Amino acid sequence: MAKFELIMPKMGESIIEATILKWLKQPGDKVELDETVLEIATDKVDSEVPSPVEGVIKEILYPENETVEVGKVLAIIETDAAETEVVSSILDETPTSNGKSEAPPVKESPQPIKQPEPVPASAGSLGNGTRFYSPLVRNIAKSEGIGMGELEALPGTGKEGRVTKKDILSYVERRKSGAAPVSAPAVKETVAPPKVAVAASPQLAASKSMGGDVEVVEMDRMRKLIADHMVMSKHTSPHVTSFVEADVTNIVNWRNKVKKEFQAKYGEKITFTPIFIEALAKTIKDFPMVNVSVDGKNILVKKNINVGMATALPSGNLIVPVIRNADQFNLLGLTKQVNDLAVRARQNKLKPEDIQGGTYTITNVGTFGNVMGTPIINQPQVAIMSVGVIKKKPAVIETPEGDFIGIRHMMYLSHSYDHRVVDGFLGGSFLRRFADYLEAFDVNQNI
């Protein structure tokens, strides 16, 4: 029997670690080729890790909820290969969009793989420390103003007392509520880190005393990330929202006319979303100062137009896959991009790069039957567009022969923008131009 080392795969250029959500196999279980062994999560996306070999799970090296660096051995699988063979999954292997690995197992020497030495805490900007801290933990500590002395005093639940992402986020929550000390003295290496006294938060205490008529439901991992991101966005950007009502009758009539032929010809269902994104890309080219981000006192103007489309998941959470260089696609190309990303998002098959690099976001609250919304900016972007439900309404129609009342398909548009860099004139003009492009849609164009 040969031993195969299942390794934490690389999930993208900026991803250096991932959290084990669930082991689908346990020691002693048989595993088939390409069968999913465990589910993992990064700050960007959830994914599955398949087995590149057929065999039996011999040993699991990390428990659930443990954060593990890329390249670390997750489990040992025994295979029917010759006893002298020791195989290992490739360190930079990335699960494909269907959850299967494309790289074959690689033969290596019988000696066990030497794991990389942890980077000492002194390598970061937080100063010297006696424990290993992952870059993610160090970045959270830096952004929250947690010094090395305070970090050293924080008990860790990870391997060998390591502070995990869950540990520091829990500490940040307690710290903000006043249940944990804001600062702690530096701890020498020869002294064991003191335990941090944790008082029950008012919310938790209240929920325990509410009685049997209230159910306490803990947020799942993605909901916690969304909550933190939304609070950070409102804290970062002074939001302003402008509104416009647009006549989208031409778009509705054209889509109704061509949707069957479009699907028969291209094998794709055409929705309103690619039409909106096409108009949005044109508007961004007209107003490039909305396609920016803020870095201190500097404005970073993005040359690429990467449009994120907010997508609701079956769990009720939200994710924002990105169409890169949206201005370079025609309507057919945008339709394929939109459909592909939406399907993979709902099947939990997005790759980390699918949700990175967005420069502007659009969200469709009309899918929930909502007339309009006031969306929160998706940081580090500076603006977001919301489109509402399309409804038939009586409207004044202006013609050279005179005005008359007619039934039109109308829709409200909401544009939220960061008032630090986008003022009312720019934000309002952008919104009006977007509506103009929608209203000027060519109903006679061919597919």
Image: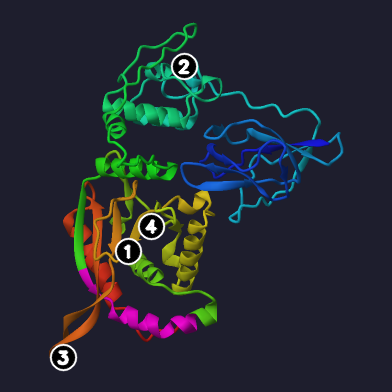
Q: Find residue 221 and report its image quarter.
A: top left
Tag 3: residue type?
Pro
| Magenta highlight range | 245-262
Q: Which mark is residue 310?
A: 4
SS category of the residue bearing label 4: loop
Nearest the viewer among 68 and 103 is: 68
Tag 4: residue type?
Ala
Please indicate whether residue 400 sits to the left or right of residue 345 in the image.
left
How far from the left and from the top, in percent, is residue 128?
A: 45, 16
Along the polypeptide, which appears first: circle 4 or circle 2? 2
Q: Residues within 10 Å of mark 1 (few under 14, many from 20)?
A: few
Tell whether position 261 is magenta.
yes
What's the magenta bit mostly, secondary-structure-wise? helix
The nearer-to-camera label among 4 and 2 is: 4
Nearest the viewer among 5 and 370 is: 370
Cβ–Cβ under 8 Å for marks 2 and 3: no
